[in-house]
Amino acid sequence: MSGTTIGDPAARRFVQTTTTAALTVIWTGRHSGLVPYLSEHLSSVLPTALITVDDFNTETQVFGISCLEHIIEHVTRTELNWYGQGDVIYKALERLLYHREAELVRPLLRCVVLLLGKLEGGYTSHDNNYKWSRYDDVLQIVLQNTEHEQNIPLRRAYMDSLPALLDASKMGVIRWSKRLLRILREYLEVAGYSEHDSAIPTLQVLKVYLEHCQPRIAHNSEALFQMLLRLLYDITKSSEGDGVQSQKIDSRVFQETVDLIEECLDVVIKNAPVQAHNIGSPPSLPIYGSYWFVLLCNYKYIYKSFDTLARWYNTKLLGLHLGPLPTVVACDLDTVKEIFARPEFNGRLDCYISQARAMGVTLGLFFTDSDLWLEQRRFTLRHLRDYGFARRSGLQEENIRQEVMDLLALLNSSKGREDYDVFHDGCALLPQLFCPGMINCLWSVLAGDRFPPEAHKKLRQVAEASFHFVKDVEPTGGALVLTPWLRHFGRNGFGFNGLVKGTGYVTEFFREAVKDHKKNYSEDSLRDFIDDYIQELKKNDTKNIVNSFSEDQLLLLATDLILPTAATVPAMLTFTLIMLLHHPQVMLKAQKEIDGVVGRDRLPSLDDRSSLPYLEAIQREVHRRQSLLPLSVFRRCTEDTMLNGYFIPQHTLVVPNLWSVHNDPELWGDPENFRPERFLDEEGRLLRKDITMPFGGGHVIRREKDRMSERPLQNKEKGRRAIGRPRTELMDQAQKDMEDKGADWRRVAQGEVWRDRNGRECARRHAEKTTLITPDRYSNLDLPFTDSRVFCESIALEHAATEAGRRVCAGETFSRFTIYLFLAALLQNFTFSAPEGKPIPGLDDVISGFSVSPPDFWVKVVPRN
Ligand code: HEM
């Protein structure tokens, strides 16, 4: 045959009949310099190679396969597809996939990979990786063979060949993930036990799998860990000659295997999910579940009990069963912050006590969630703000100042006048002394009016009812939530009577005001929040709109505003004075600071706040030392989710333990000490960052569309002038001041960045939202007034509590301003001390309930010279 060319018809005829001749021709082709010009001879050599592949002799078949491989390698993809030649080759090779000769499997699979690379082109990022392809056909057969193969050389052959095949199928491997892992587990088990050499090719397959199936690693991480660690254990034992039945592993193989295991483990660890398992928790017993242990630990102060249990279990996220309720308690700053930030933790528990206080349905703001809460909260805050609430407004400051002046007048009078029961002989009863003033501050916004001193007695009864609400039931609602029938037992029905009667009293008190407003209502001049709500109700009536607005809802939401105003804010002020009584040097220092900045001729104003850092530090420290709502208001998880790597099922009760955060030694060093200086730098300036969170929540980001829907204030102002309480001179002056300062205080919009008057960047505007840059809006004590319409146009720093979806205390700004103005004026004018013969409460004497309250006590009030 020497001198014959491939294209020669005689030679072709000859090779078609003689296998040996075919082998020779192909051999000649491979070695006679045809490469890379094989394409023009394709039609001649391909039939010969195919015949060879079809031979009964394995050796010949292998030779045929290598010829095909050679052909595929040296023709282009297009040429291969001419007349379906590629498909013909594929069919010929596919048939061979069922053969069980190890020497054939390796070249066969190599050739298949080569062929499919040309026919399928391999997966690309644009392909639909989940479309069935010929790779899948091949993998299906090969994996099936591999799985059931017991012949050791054949098993090796498959493992040697699989990496290339898997590599070529890329993401397509995911489809075969389950079967592949099953095979690998079985192969590695055998490799660890006896076939040490086969560990390396099997691990190579695993490596390729990990590379292409990254999305599945998290799901299979546990199985992967197990198989790798088991192999490591087995071969380590074998390397030490410990294996009972296995022979000693070769040191080179051992090293190579360990290296590969390490590589694989590295990938698995990197992709493993944060562990999703149940949280360690105290055991669950009948009826109250783990609540028994909580009570056992510290039945008086549940928040301390949670903290102790968390430390006991060495976790920051404590899991419990409060009766049937799965509960998690977060005891560290980061987790608590995360809970406040994530909308899936915005739910509230709908339980018997939340319904019992509201005519059998859940209404108001505290205990509602989903659409009702969202709609009511947005409406409430938007309209309250129009009357100065929850933002810095001249109107609000003037209202508070009026109450401050009344209080100072009372404390300066020698006789107790109408308030004899709370002030006489130079001694005042706390916290009742502060309650009427606080309620009045809110009342001016809600009902456009204030109660004169003669009516303070009535307000103190409202406050007493509010204190019942907050004192009588402990923070989680505890036993009553779990076993409501307890309300029929005990003197106070385990707090039930206080809770329901307290709420009921406040609701009835407000109902009177609503009745009055309905009588005098005028569409043209809206006087206050009640009028706004009535207008909304009428609008819904006229247009037949069904939504969450109703008179009962109005009553309950106002109740939810009055309760904390009447109880929590006076409690805070009282706690502050208790701390100062125990630390007279702190009181003296604060008084000196006020004297230096404000003097004695005028009352401290909100403008002075930024110049009184020590006073501000005192308030922060009191908020920290005495968390008023130690467990915030408990939340409910609205969907299955993960927290700190733990799985939290839907409807789990989620409790942010603010007390733990405020008393964490890692954060504060000496949390048990009252030390305002911890909030100041060496030069006595207030630290910008404040990580206390007495009001829960956190920073609120306001959306652009809320900003745009801001309504002008004029019609409200008109109404107030015409019908409501007349404006005082002071109010007019304050309004004028604001208008004057407005131009100066206006924020300058520079592109997407808002700057304040000092040129500091304070907000950044994106397409849909405005993001506050200031890390803590309350560390900026220089908040400008927002009454002026000029300012309303540049509202970046305004309190943004209307942000949909965020649960924050609705009264934070109001409380902070009120407490500051009262405290500053009291310290400016009086010194407080313990009355002779009467003890003052200790620093930790608190009554724990829905919020913590101070015990009633008398304090001596001495005017300063
Ligand atoms: C020092 C006084 C106060 C403290 C320490 C305080 C603290 C809190 C806390 C921790 C929450 C739970 C927030 C959450 O679920 O993340 C809350 C909610 C609330 N607070 Fe306050 N608060 C105070 C005063 C007030 C005042 C004066 C009002 C009303 C004028 C008020 C109205 C509310 C309302 C309506 C909620 C429920 C908000 C909602 O669930 O959407 N708070 N408060």
Image (spheres, helix red, strand yellow):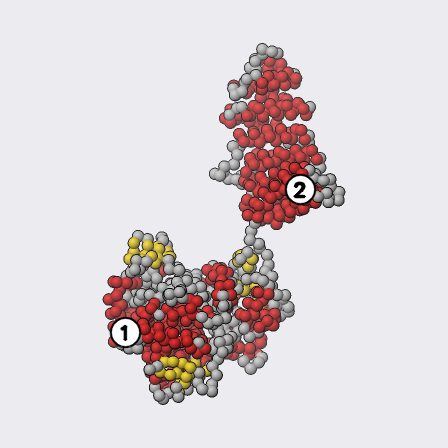
Q: How many marks?
A: 2
Q: Residues within 10 Å of mark 2 (few under 14, many from 20)?
A: many
Residue situated furthest top in the rendering: 3
- Identity, as a three-letter code, of the amino acid under mark 2: Leu
Which element type, helix, strand or loop, lies under badge 2?
Answer: helix
The numbered dot on residue 188 is 2
Q: Residues under labels 1 and 2: Cα distance? A: 83 Å
Location of residue 531 in the rendering, given as x and y in whole percent from the top left corner: 34, 72
Query: In which image quadrant can residue 187 be found?
Result: top right
Q: Residue at x 63, y 65 (%)?
A: 283
Of labels 1 and 2, earlier in sequence is 2
Q: Residue at x 58, y 39 (%)?
A: 208
Q: Residue at x 75, y 44 (%)?
A: 244
Q: Is residue 733 left or right of residue 138?
A: left
Location of residue 651 in the rendering, given as x and y in whole percent from the top left corner: 54, 62
The residue tagged 1 is: 731
Asked if residue 594 shows in the view, the reply is yes
Comparing labels 1 and 2, the label whose residue is closer to the camera = 2
Q: Is residue 311 above or below residue 576?
A: above
Q: Residue at x 37, y 65 (%)?
A: 683
Query: In which image quadrant can residue 329 be found?
Result: bottom right
